[in-house]
Amino acid sequence: MAVDGLSVAAVVGGGDAPLLLEIGGLVLALGLLARIADRVEISPIPLYLIAGLVLGQISDEPLSFSGEVIEIGAQIGLVLLLFMLGLEYTGDELAASLRSGLPTGLLDLGLNFMPGLLAGLALGWDITAALLLGGVTYISSSGVVAKVLDDLNRLGNRETPAVLSILVLEDLAMAVYLPVVAVLLADTALAGGLALAAVGLLAAAGALWVALRHGQTASRLLSSRSDEVLLLTVLGFVLLVAGGAEGLRLSAAVGAFLAGILVSGSLAERVRNLFAPLRDLFAAAFFIFFGLQVDAGAIPPVLLVAVGLAVLTGATKLVTGWQAAKRIGVGIPGRVRAGTALVPRGEFSIVIAGLGVAAGLEADLGPLAASYVLLTALTGPVLTRWADRIAASVRARLAPAPASA
């Protein structure tokens, strides 16, 4: 017998107890990791990633729900991270940031795409596999960066718009890159990939125009005196926009970010307060799921190459962030904070490598990308936490030597 889709056994306490125990144990473990991170004053992201990595090595299916529930939770977590980041900015601020950040965005492309491309060619891979590795090293993780900036209370910092402009430009570049790569992997007409890329860019431009022109109208339509109504309405809206963005060959991250820009004024503050706990819960699922995808056994043979790429492209991201912040008049501490914030790679890099693995390209592409991403995702938040100390060291080195007596 069932009552509203629930069995009588479930209602009276039977049936799903192991599932609830697994979920409860996982959430409690995440809380413990977050408590440890708070005690030692670091971001909890590295601990979440390590937990996912360890959990993934216990067995092929460490949790009965991991392949479904955690993956869905991870997608929602990424969407909420970028939505909350979008709440910090108005459409006018974003437009100005993108205009000022375009030259640095091109620098970012050159500095961070080329190391992966050249490394792939040096390893003897074909051009398609090398292009995929270039994409892996190019794009920073919007999810990791957004979470770190929030953990360290830096969303309102002067350098954050510069970081944001780089992230948005990278995600827009993916609207061109991914369709073209898909065509190369399928060995079909290039015109089809270019058409898909054009659709993605037009969708992004249209969404930005709506955010600029009709943000206040959207806020009025979403607003409600009831917190419950507001939470459900805005959450549904964000998920629909993110899903629609993916359907138009644009990333869900860009869609969620633009949805956040639509919410403005006093409503944005209410939404931030309502969504912060929800975001933290699902963001933890995102980082756990990321760690679960990494096969630790395949890492040792490619670890040296991964470390070399991580060091090199960590430095090139520092240069990118430094230049982006410098262009908007930020001082040395802010430039270093911007550069270190961009170091982590994540969700897009894994997606790009996954395309090559699914197409049967180089056997080392998957393990190399996974170990590289894990290295940058672990070290990036730590570098960002130490950014002010690094900046003090840089400032001391750049200071002119005192004149001799």
Image (cartoon, grey):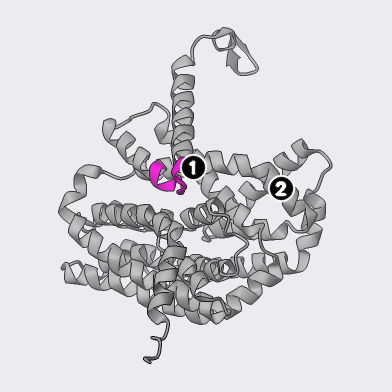
Q: Which residue is drawn at 62% across and 53% down?
A: 84
> What is the three-letter code of the residue carrying label 1?
Asp
- Residue 39 among those drawn in magenta: yes
Tell me if residue 161 comes above or below residue 355 in the rendering.
Answer: below
Q: Which quarter shows the C terminus?
A: bottom left
From the viewer's perspective, tell me whether residue 186 is left or right of residue 277. Answer: left
According to the image, label 2 marks what residue? 271
Q: Residue at x 51, y 9 (%)?
A: 14
Question: Element under label 1?
Answer: helix
Estimate the x, y position of residue 361 in percent, counting from the top left: 23, 58
The stretch in magenta equals 38-47
Which image quadrant for residue 310? bottom left
Tell me if residue 51 comes above or below residue 129 in the rendering.
Answer: above
Mark 2 or mark 1, whichever is nearer to me: 1
Q: Residue at x 69, y 45 (%)?
A: 273
Q: Residue at x 40, y 86 (%)?
A: 402
According to the image, label 1 marks what residue? 38
Q: How far apart are marks 2 and 1 (CA)?
A: 24 Å
* 283 vs 76, nearest the viewer: 283
* 69 vs 33, nearest the viewer: 33
Estimate the x, y position of residue 185 in percent, counting from the top left: 32, 62
Choose the circle earlier in sequence order: 2 or 1. 1
From the viewer's perspective, tell me whether residue 184 is left or right of residue 89. Answer: left
